[in-house]
């Protein structure tokens, strides 16, 4: 058994074989409170847990009672995307609301699991606390690091060891990347994982050349009017673009989101101009609309 004392952070971390227990000191140093007790001090969090339990009770809400892990999937995804939108718009008041909605989903799923004797919200908190401590040995242990890259390498190594101890030996380096992740994000993760083992281009010119190759193949499939081949080649083009973004350390998902937002902003501006001129878009030709688009673009970028 090893004991690591981190006085500055007032933590005790006990490691016994594969089991970890995390304690937080109370104001009285003679008392050790497990994080369960520490969690209960957070009145509103505790109230949220109780509210969800009541909503799921016999006298609770019919809609909440009927929900399952599976039925809540779209709501969890929706709340996460709304949170991202609040972050992108820097609307911190809305971010508070959206983070609350995400937290609600965590508590909701935990309550459903508790009713089925699977786990509860305490188990969820316990799991993430122990994981954070295990994977930050440079903070809670004696492992020295030199920069964030070594932190990432240590994190990955600890994660692999955890999987081995759980009996989940990977057959592939790509195991563990969810198939239902957004396609651009999943492509980035796959490329990133392969790159760590040396399966990667040596410089930016290589993926740029690959993109050119894939574009030519897409053009050829379009000329042949083969839907199956067009879909396949278009996917290759998108995958190649993600690879370039990875080389440039650009988030392809965020980059595309910015372009989509830009298109929406400019299209709405055109609609506003048409309303002011009492014109209908469907009555204008493409050249006229393109001129309006360029006008909106110039207004966004004065002097260009």
Image: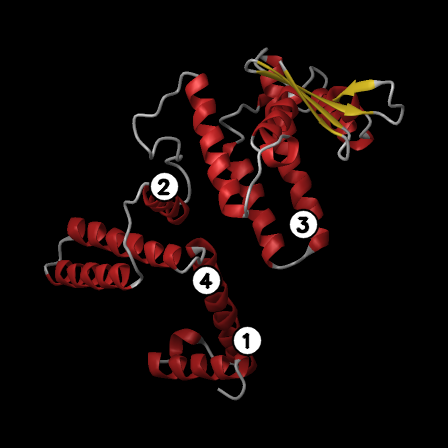
Residue 5, horizontal then vertical, whole percent: 72, 26
Q: Which element is circle 1 on?
A: helix
| Position above or below: 298 against 73 | below
Residue at x 55% of width, y 48% of height: 147
Q: Is residue 136 visible?
A: no
Q: Which element is circle 4 on?
A: helix
Q: CA distance from mark 1 to mark 4?
A: 18 Å
Residue at mark 1: 272
Q: CA distance from mark 3 to mark 1?
A: 29 Å
Residue 132, horizontal then vertical, whole percent: 60, 31
Of circles 3 and 1, the one toward us is 3
Residue at mark 2: 193
Instruction: Find out whether the residues at labels 2 and 4 contact each other: C-beta distance under 8 Å.
Output: no
| Position above or below: 233 against 301 | above
Residue at mark 4: 260
Which badge, 2 or 3, comes first in the chain's sequence? 3
């Amino acid at each position: 058994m090893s004991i690591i004392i981190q006085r500055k952070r007032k933590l005790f971390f006990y490691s016994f074989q594969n089991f970890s227990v995390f304690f937080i000191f109370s104001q009285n140093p003679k008392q050790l409170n497990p994080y369960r007790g520490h969690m209960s001090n957070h009145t509103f969090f505790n109230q949220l847990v109780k509210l969800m339990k009541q909503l799921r009770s016999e006298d609770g809400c019919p809609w909440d009672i009927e929900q399952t892990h599976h039925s809540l999937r779209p709501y969890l995804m929706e709340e996460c995307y709304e949170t991202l939108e609040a972050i992108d718009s820097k609307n911190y008041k809305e971010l508070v609301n959206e983070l609350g909605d995400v937290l609600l989903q965590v508590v909701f799923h935990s309550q459903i699991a508790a009713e089925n004797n699977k786990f509860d919200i305490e188990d969820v908190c316990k799991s993430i606390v122990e994981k954070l401590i295990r994977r930050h040995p440079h903070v809670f242990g004696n492992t020295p690091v030199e920069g964030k890259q070594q932190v990432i390498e240590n994190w990955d190594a600890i994660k692999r060891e955890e999987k081995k101890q759980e009996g989940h030996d990977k057959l592939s380096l790509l195991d563990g990347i969810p198939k239902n992740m957004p396609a651009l994000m999943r492509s980035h993760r796959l490329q990133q994982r392969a790159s760590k083992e040396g399966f990667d281009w040596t410089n930016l010119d290589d993926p740029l050349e690959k993109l050119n190759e894939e574009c030519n193949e897409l053009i050829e499939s379009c000329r042949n009017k083969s839907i199956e081949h067009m879909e396949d080649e278009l996917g290759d083009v998108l995958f190649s673009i993600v690879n370039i973004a990875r080389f440039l350390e650009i988030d392809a998902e965020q980059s595309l989101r910015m372009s989509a937002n830009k298109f929406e902003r400019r299209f709405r501006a055109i609609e506003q101009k048409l309303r002011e001129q009492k014109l209908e878009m469907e009555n204008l030709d493409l050249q006229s609309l393109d001129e309006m688009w360029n006008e909106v673009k110039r207004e966004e970028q004065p002097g260009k």
